[in-house]
Image (cartoon, rainbow, N blue to C red):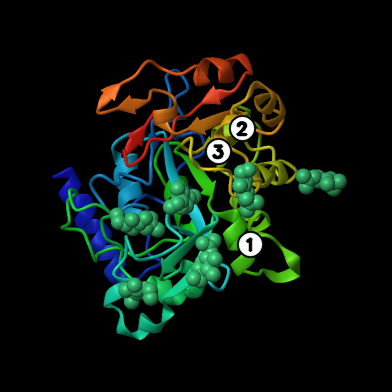
Amino acid sequence: MGSACLILFALSCLIVGSAARPFYPPPSEVAEGERRPLQTSRPYNIAHRGSNGELPEETAAAYMRAIKEGADFIETDILSSKDGVLICFHDVTLDNTTDVAQHKEFANRNRTYVVQGNNTTGFFTVDFTLKELKSLRVRQRYPFRDQQYNGKFQIITFEEYITIALDATRVVGIYPEIKYPVFINERVKWQNGKKFEDVFVETLKKYGYKGSYLSDEWKKQPAFIQSFAPTSLVYASNLTDLPKIFLIDDITVPTEDTNQSYWEITSDGYFDFIKNYVVGIGPGKDTVVPVVNNYLQPRTDLIARAHAHDLEKFPKPISAPLHL
Ligand SMILES: *[C@@H]1O[C@H](CO)[C@@H](O)[C@H](O)[C@H]1NC(C)=O
Ligand SMILES: *[C@@H]1O[C@H](CO)[C@@H](O)[C@H](O)[C@H]1NC(C)=O
Ligand SMILES: *[C@@H]1O[C@H](CO)[C@@H](O)[C@H](O)[C@H]1NC(C)=O
Ligand SMILES: *[C@@H]1O[C@H](CO)[C@@H](O)[C@H](O)[C@H]1NC(C)=O
Ligand SMILES: *[C@@H]1O[C@H](CO)[C@@H](O)[C@H](O)[C@H]1NC(C)=O
Ligand SMILES: *[C@@H]1O[C@H](CO)[C@@H](O)[C@H](O)[C@H]1NC(C)=O
């Protein structure tokens, strides 16, 4: 019954209006001190893009479902619309997880841009206003997942995502990624010369997110800032003391901003540098325990070396709904 209710309710919210989010009582209706605190006695359950194995990724429904299932943190990727509104969306293009191809009015928006050194073709979020993005509906990324919720949910904004966490009846943390910052800063301009990273941190501050890892103010509204781009993390460290996580891609992908190789950014010397700005790393799980022909290989020394540099680890799996 639980899941049916959740889905029906989420649907009725969407029909009533895109701004609707009454599933959890607003924070004002929850007495101070009443909410169950974040658990810190075991590893965190981090819902990667929400409960995306069940419901289309990064939608309100996927995040509410993850909270219902007990996630300590809900994870998201932040990109921007053409008019500078931050949204929860994973790919630079809309093609793989929305119905944009069915919208004839947008047929002429197909573009090719260089993203992370590669020509990428499709319908880019940065070529659509928020209003246009809201007219699309999200669908499952993979055919082996449940397709019945395709076309039912909208893309949500960073602020809408934050309110889902804040409105939960217990303390639920957020885990947003500064996604493709080099590309976003190239294509989107904000007033007063602000950068993507500035707007990202301002949004967190607007909703009261602050404090270093495990401080009292942090535990009230826990948040991690994650990015694959070291310059974004170093820049953000000047703006907020919220804990940051350095994401590390697979061994073939250089950093998008500094063009450093996997080997460079996982060296002891680099860990010594980056630990001044971040509390942990988020390596791809294959760099922790490699897989060859479907067989797990011996674990690498990555985690042991990161711990030797006092870095926590938060492996970032590819396409798993929850990660520890
Ligand atoms: C979309 O899916 C195709 C096919 O799986 C894949 O090759 C492509 O990289 C995906 N695009 C993005 C932007 O992830
Ligand atoms: C977008 O443009 C590419 C390259 O011209 C083309 O292959 C692709 O089919 C187009 N996609 C859509 C949905 O129009
Ligand atoms: C760019 O394309 C190359 C060659 O196809 C590929 O090896 C590499 O992984 C791509 N880089 C990214 C960041 O997608
Ligand atoms: C992208 O495509 C254009 C046009 O075909 C080409 O001139 C350019 O070299 C390509 N860039 C990259 C990074 O592959
Ligand atoms: C951090 O702020 C200081 C003081 O405003 C400035 O000098 C420095 O360049 C900034 N560092 C980064 C990485 O932006
Ligand atoms: C990135 O580094 C590689 C390897 O050193 C080099 O071949 C490539 O030209 C560099 N790319 C850019 C955009 O600087």
- Label 2: which residue? 265
- The tally of labels here is 3
Q: In the image, is residue 98 above or below residue 284? A: below
Q: In the image, is residue 45 above or below residue 107? A: above
Instruction: Say whether disc 2 or disc 3 marks the residue closer to the N-terminus.
Output: 3
Measured as percent of width and height from the top left, residue 291 is found at: 32, 27
Measured as percent of width and height from the top left, residue 75 is found at: 44, 43
Please state which of residues 105 and 160 is positioned toward the viewer in this rendering.
105
- Label 3: which residue? 224
Q: Nearer the viewer, mark 1 or mark 3?
A: 1
Residue 95 as seen in the image, left or right of residue 174: left
Mark 1, Cα crowd under 10 Å, few <14 / some 14-19 / many 20+, is some
Q: Nearer the viewer, mark 2 or mark 1?
A: 2
The residue shown at (46%, 67%) is 125
Amino acid carrying mark 3 in the image: Phe
Label 1, secondary structure: give it. helix
Amino acid carrying mark 1 in the image: Asn
Q: Quadrant of the C terminus?
A: top left
Amino acid carrying mark 2 in the image: Ile
Instruction: Say whether disc 2 or disc 1 marks the residue closer to the N-terminus.
Output: 1
Q: Quadrant of residue 218?
A: top right
Mark 2, Cα crowd under 10 Å, few <14 / some 14-19 / many 20+, is some
- Label 1: which residue? 185
Residue 257, visible in the rendered structure: yes
Label 2, secondary structure: give it. helix
Residue 51 as seen in the image, left or right of residue 1: right
